[in-house]
Amino acid sequence: MITGGKRFVSSPPAFSNDAKKLLVCTGNTVSVYSTSTGLLMTELEGHKALVTSVIVLPASTPATKILCYCWTSSLDGTICYWDFSLPELMKKVDIGLPIFSMVIPNVSGPPVRDNGKPGDLFAYISVEDTTKPVDDAKALRGQIRKCNLTKSRLLGGLTLAETQQPEAITISPSREFFGILSKRKIILWKVPAKDSENDVVKKIILHHTKSFTVIAFHPTQKIIAAGDVTGRILIWRDFGKRTFSRSVGFLSGRTVENQEERPGVRGDDDAESCSTWHWHPAKVMVLSFSCDGAYLYSGGKEGVLVVWQLDTGKKKFLPRIGSPLLFFTHSPDPSLFSISCANNQIHLLKMPSLKILNSIAGIKLPCSFPEIYQGLYGGVAFDQNAGLVAIQTEDYCVQFYSLFDDREASQVRICERNHQPDDDITLVVTLLALSVDGSKMGTVEVKLPEEGIGGLVCLKFWASGSKSGDFTLSTVIYEPHSDAGISALAFHPNHHMAVSSSYGGDFKIWVCNNDLQQQDQMLQKSGWRCHSVGSYKKKPMTAAAFSADGSVLAVAAGTVVTLWDPDRNVLVAVIGENLMPIVSLSFVGDSEYFVSISGGSESQLSVWSMSKLSVSWSYRLHAEAVACMTDASLFAVLALLPKSSKRLASDENRQTGNDGVILLFNVENPIPLSTWSVNKAKAGRLAFLQVDPSLYDKNVPGKKEPQALLAYVNGDHEYVVFDTYYGEDHMIRKNRTENLVSQEETGHFGYASIYGELRELDIRRDQNPEVPYAPSEKPWETIFSGSSHILPPLTKLCSTFLESLLEKRPVIQE
């Protein structure tokens, strides 16, 4: 079984001490990526639930930069200590409560006690109290607790704070303070100098009129910045001067409660002053001070990184990142940072030039369309031969993602227009289709009308490039079915032919003159054109599919299925009457059967026989997707579990969160061959992939040849690929060594890291190498073009310069 498609941006990442590795929380594992190449190096596997935080032990001396140790926390209630250079799990602490966030103030080592012996190492964690009811809106399920990592236990009876939901903990760069957000309050604690189980952790509370979203600590001063839901940034200076100092209530002989001496501070908050900045139009999601504290970085939904100069308030921007910002992470290298974006991408940023050096791209997350546009979204498509899945994205692109390698293969821009995350949705890519061999792609765009005016449907055909997932635009067709929407798009399995059906009551067959012909010394370009048009009693055409050999075209006309000869566009037969409109059609291999799904409140799966022109057998179930094998009589169905079903919705499924089931059928038998329970089945998709023998271990005794690989992509774009013969629990051997980069990377240091490697020169005494130089008619336009180290020698420059000042005598021919 191959799993992938996990979120890379569920929690902040962490850099290694040498800044050559980036540790990313990906589902139940921690993935270690190379910052120079963006490729996966290794994985830390040991948690059984979502990993929520990763903390790398800092290097105390330059010699300890090679150390690769980290702490991780998870929703499974465990804290793990790793050596991620091997990788190896060295210690596990089980506290029995889901951990949503964790900070370790003395992460480099426990403090030394008065007797000279090392003390205990403590972690402050944000956990969920599972004993309180979930349906109680007033229940305080979030808690800030203290954990003794040395003795592997949670301190009983000590709760620093209680909130309605578990909150993220933020720690200062000096590791002296940490805090959380609780609606309109900021709760801050000061870590004791020599932390022990009995020490009292002092806290203060800062207030605001709006709900907070993010906080950040200054690296050297007692300054804290916080963003709110309105886009404002509040900056408090000298926070905790009363509570965290020895004197209480008075500073320098004067009270600090005088409002005139504490501008901007609300009520009795413990701070000297508070100022407000405002540029972001929506809530602030990212806040972080620079390493020297001179600048403040902020970002939010608009996808722009703002760099504020702390003393003057002046700004500069990194615009058009293309997705809302979630996290901003520092590295030990002051010039390297990472930005985590909502589109499941992590960008490595170079400072101060604000240049994106590299990106780690995960599978794109589902588009967040408004509810009224959800019906227009067409899901995903599969390239079965290459093992790729095509995902539609919010920025008008199609992402091709490798299911075997769990990484992005390519991106194709469908619409040439700028995308801003906070813009209103005016264009939706509704349909996406790939040919069987993956050489052709079709897309359908819908420009949404504004106040009922200006709607437009556009059909585009694409041709494959030199590699899988690389496409170029071939043909653009505006309003292919007048003003009606397109319901389905499918390609012929063998020829350059496609069919599109519309809700307006017709379907069109498109052909491509792919063979280039030379006429009158001119090369004719290939393109798609309409070959024929068909309809049936003016009923809406809701689905279409070609048979395995392409001889039959099935088009659903409302509640009936019409069979056509695609070459002659002749109606061959009309099959039966369904209770509900048919929304999906699929032919099962090279057999005479095809499968249909009818939508509505009474969803039904039906298997039709073309020879009998009737339904062979049917099921009453809520089917989300169907996948058919191209060379066998098997097909798989993804169905949602009914909430009222006592037989299917078992207690085990409720505990695991499984809400769907995959059923594997032989087309001639209504009894399923195999079943698998899955989660997040709503909007999920299925596909059979071409078998790759390298994925299997041939040394397994008694193992038969693999039949097929079945890929399941759930509603959150997480996926699993498994062998239908052995089932979901069978582990497919995946050779990850070709995809992983070496742990020991050859890096450049000193002069080479700035200017690159010096060229090896073999200069002998009897040689006098000269830099190539070619004079031209206009030497001063080209002589200084290029790098300074390849300029001609001074003797060449002087003679050329003097010649340019002299007038040449014209040559008189006799």
Image (cartoon, helix red, strand yellow):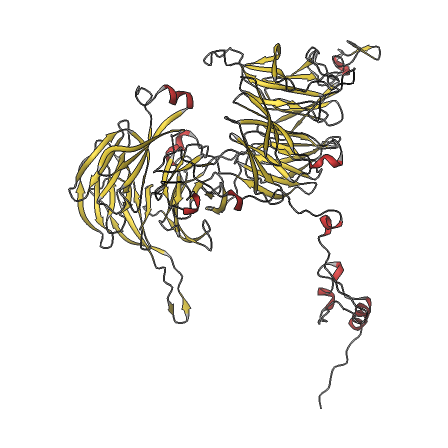
Residue situated in front as seen by the camera: 665 or 90: 90
Does residue 814 sit above or below 684 in this rendering? Answer: below
Farthest front residue in view: 701
Does residue 229 sit above or below 617 in this rendering? Answer: above
Residue situated in front as seen by the camera: 65 or 299: 65
Q: Quadrant of the C terminus?
A: bottom right
How many badges with numbers are in the image?
A: 0
Q: Is residue 80 left or right of residue 593?
A: right
Where residue 240 sits: x, y (%)? 73, 16
Farthest left residue in view: 612
Q: In which quadrant of the rendered view does residue 445 lie? A: top left
Q: In which quadrant of the rendered view does residue 366 lie? A: top left
Residue pictured at 24% horizontal, 41% vertical: 594
Q: In which quadrant of the rendered view does residue 200 lie? A: top right
Where residue 344 sits: x, y (%)? 53, 36
Q: Quadrant of the N terminus?
A: top left
Q: Is residue 790 left or right of residue 454?
A: right
Where residue 335 sits: x, y (%)? 70, 40
Does residue 650 sit above or below 341 in this rendering? Answer: above
- The answer to whether residue 743 of the structure is visible from this angle is yes
Residue situated in front as seen by the camera: 147 or 371: 147
Farthest right residue in view: 253
Residue pictured at 19% horizontal, 44% vertical: 610
Where residue 786 sits: x, y (%)? 71, 60
- The answer to whether residue 398 of the structure is visible from this angle is no
